[in-house]
Amino acid sequence: MPTLNMQVPYELNTHSIDNYVEKSCIGNYALGFVGKGEFHVQYVGRSDNDLNARIKTHIGEKSTIRK
């Protein structure tokens, strides 16, 4: 199976996003959940101007994040 080559998963909340994602940077991210020791991707997104703010739009969804 292909890999996304992303870091370990983080909780989808403001604290985690601010700790691990720089403001005003560009990048890709994946949302999903950890099950049976693997990260299962449910959504892949990107931001061309503010990755931190873009990821925060997903807070409240039942997912974790990888960037």
Image: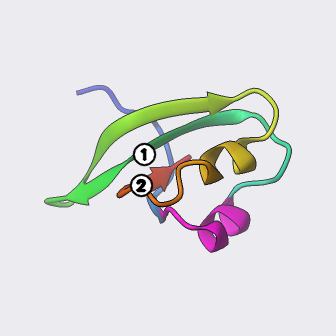
- The answer to if 19 sits in the magenta stretch is yes
Residue 62's disc is none
First-in-chain label (2 vs 1): 1
- Amino acid type, mark 1: Leu
What is the distance, in whole Å, between disc 2 and disc 1 at their CAs? 9 Å
The residue at 35%/58% (across/down) is 62
- The answer to if 47 sits in the magenta stretch is no
On the image, numbered disc 2 is attached to which residue? 61
- Amino acid type, mark 2: Glu
Badge 1 element = strand
28 left or right, relative to 19? left
Residue 17 percent across, percent down from the top left: 64, 62
The quarter of the picture where residue 18 lies is: bottom right
The residue at 83%/52% (across/down) is 23
Q: Is residue 26 above or below residue 8?
A: above
30 left or right, relative to 56? left
Q: Is 54 or 30 nearer to us in this picture?
A: 54
Asked if labels 1 and 2 touch by Cβ distance under 8 angstroms, the answer is yes
Numbered range of the magenta stretch: 11-20
On the image, numbered disc 1 is attached to which residue? 31
Q: Is 38 or 13 nearer to us in this picture?
A: 13
Q: Tell me if mark 2 has few (under 14), some (14-19) or many (20+) residues whose alpha carbon lies within 10 angstroms of its own.
A: few
The residue at 40%/35% (across/down) is 43
Residue 29 percent across, percent down from the top left: 54, 39
